[in-house]
Image (cartoon, rainbow, N blue to C red):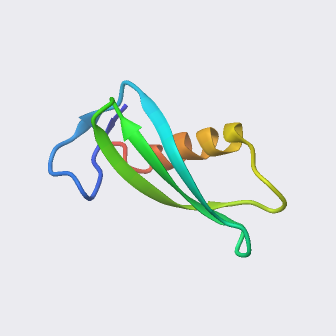
Amino acid sequence: MTIKLENFTSTIDVQSVIVTSVYDNVQEKTASVDVLINGKYGTNLNGFTYTKSWEDSDVFAWVNVELEKYEI
């Protein structure tokens, strides 16, 4: 998948994605997620929501769907 993020001037051919941090707002039940793409492009994705709790697999699945929004 090739993506174009707003904070980068070039396109990125996504080979790997690592979730480096999850910033959880427990009261709001939202989180933002820091990811590292291809081991060198770092960005923050906002908008992850949950009802009671979340698992790592929930975050990974959300990140994959979120990155698809930037696919070109």
Q: Position of residue 63 (x, y in %)?
A: 53, 45
Q: How many marks?
A: 0
Tell which residue pokes out farthest to the top in this image: 15
Tell which residue pokes out farthest to the bottom in this image: 27
Q: Position of residue 17 (x, y in %)?
A: 44, 33
For the point 70% across and 74% down, which residue is it? 28
For the C terminus, the image quarter is top left
For the N terminus, the image quarter is top left
For the point 72% across and 68% down, which residue is it? 26
Closest to the observer, 46 or 26 = 26
**In the rendered image of this protein, does residue 50 appear above or below residue 35?**
below
For the point 60% across and 46% down, which residue is it? 62
Tell which residue pokes out farthest to the left in this image: 9
Closest to the observer, 8 or 70 = 8
Q: Position of residue 12 (x, y in %)?
A: 26, 36
When asked about the image quadrant of residue 55, the answer is: top right
Q: Position of residue 59 (x, y in %)?
A: 63, 45
**In the rendered image of this protein, does residue 45 appear above or below residue 30?**
above
In the rendered structure, the answer to whether residue 27 lies left or right of residue 69 reads right
In the rendered structure, the answer to whether residue 12 lies left or right of residue 1 reads left
**In the rendered image of this protein, does residue 60 appear above or below residue 48?**
above
In the rendered structure, the answer to whether residue 52 lies left or right of residue 48 reads right
For the point 53% across and 40% down, which residue is it? 64
When asked about the image quadrant of residue 51, the answer is: bottom right
Closest to the observer, 40 or 58 = 40
